[in-house]
Image (cartoon, grey):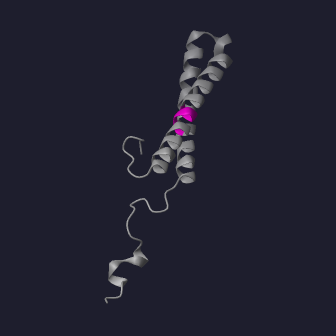
């Protein structure tokens, strides 16, 4: 979730901000690094090879970024995302006085 759409406490918003910051910085770093490395490797072979290699590097970095995002989501997984009453504590199970 984005920080602006996150409801809850200050800590919920802080967690959402940190998660988004990790995802965004990883994406930018992976794309920049892959394009730069692939372009540098193909530089001696001409501009067409360099551009092709940069495109391939970008595609590989995008796949890696999606995988990394899933890993980040697993690290920050919410225990009870709906913030509802747990199933074992439903109102039906409460004793009536």
Query: Which residue occupies the extreme front position in the image?
Result: 97
Q: Is residue 36 above or below residue 6?
A: above
Q: Is residue 65 left or right of residue 5?
A: right
Q: Is residue 90 left or right of residue 38?
A: left
Q: Write the start and end of the magenta stretch as one range.
A: 23-27
- Asked if the stretch drawn in magenta spans residue 58, the answer is no
Q: Nearer the viewer, residue 10 or 48?
A: 10
Q: Nearer the viewer, residue 52 or 96?
A: 96
Q: Is residue 84 left or right of residue 48?
A: left
| Residue occupying the point 55% across, 53% down | 74
Image spot of residue 78 (x, y percent) = 49, 57
| Secondary structure that dominates the magenta span | helix
Quarter of the figure that contains the N terminus: top left
| Residue occupying the point 55% across, 16% down | 51
- Asked if the stretch drawn in magenta spans residue 25, the answer is yes
| Residue occupying the point 57% across, 52% down | 75
């Amino acid at each position: 979730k984005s920080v602006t759409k996150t409801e809850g406490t200050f800590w919920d918003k802080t967690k959402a901000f940190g998660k988004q910051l990790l995802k965004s910085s990883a994406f930018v770093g992976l794309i920049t690094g892959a394009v730069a490395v692939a372009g540098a490797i193909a530089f001696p072979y001409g501009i067409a090879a360099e551009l092709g290699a940069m495109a391939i590097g970008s595609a590989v970095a995008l796949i890696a970024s999606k995988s990394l995002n899933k890993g980040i989501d697993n690290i920050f997984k919410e225990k009870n995302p709906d913030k509802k009453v747990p199933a074992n504590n439903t109102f039906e199970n409460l004793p009536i006085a």
